[in-house]
Amino acid sequence: FYFKCTKCSAELTMKTDPQNSYYVVEFGASRNYKPWRAEDEDVDKEKKKRDAEEMGNAMKALENRALDSKREMDILAALDDMKSMKSRHATVTPENEKTPEEEDEALNRLIFLK
């Protein structure tokens, strides 16, 4: 790709990198560091390492699936806890505050009494 900056008219060239689903800056620009890119690469490396371990070892594959299931169950339990806590906080109102229904009733009384 070849284009110019709209503010300073500097020329920029970039080349696509389809193998990595990315692009390479050739001229006129500098690359920002993107931390999620490194994290994605780390996850890919871990997955490849795990797949290599499981390739000939059925017990290791079973252990990894059990660990994944446990991790998912822990995450779901934590989410349920957060949901229940949020619903409990939503239903608790301070004593001096009125609910929206009570405010509407009080406003209606004022309007109709006048």
Image: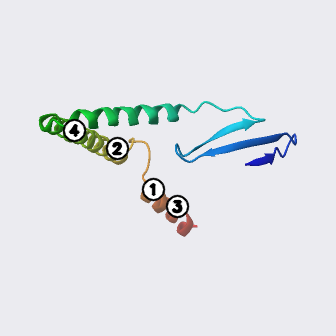
Q: Which residue is at the far bottom?
A: 112
Q: Is residue 68 above or below residue 113?
A: above
In the rendered image, which residue does mark 4 sit on?
A: 55
Query: Are there few (<14), some (14-19), or many (20+) residues within 10 Å of tag 4?
Result: few
Q: Residue under label 3, please give it.
A: 107
* Figure label count: 4
For mark 4, give the secondary structure: loop
Q: Where is residue 60 in the image (x, y as percent from the top left)?
A: 16, 34
Q: Which-is-in-front pick, marks 4 and 2? A: 4
Decide if residue 94 is on the left or right side of residue 24. left
Near mark 3 (Cα within 10 A), the count class, few <14, some 14-19 or many ≥20, is: few
Q: Which label was assigned to residue 100? A: 1
Residue in the picture at 52% in, 45% down: 19
Amino acid carrying mark 2 in the image: Lys
Q: Mark 2 = which residue?
A: 86
Residue 109, given in percent of the width and then of the height, sits at 50, 64
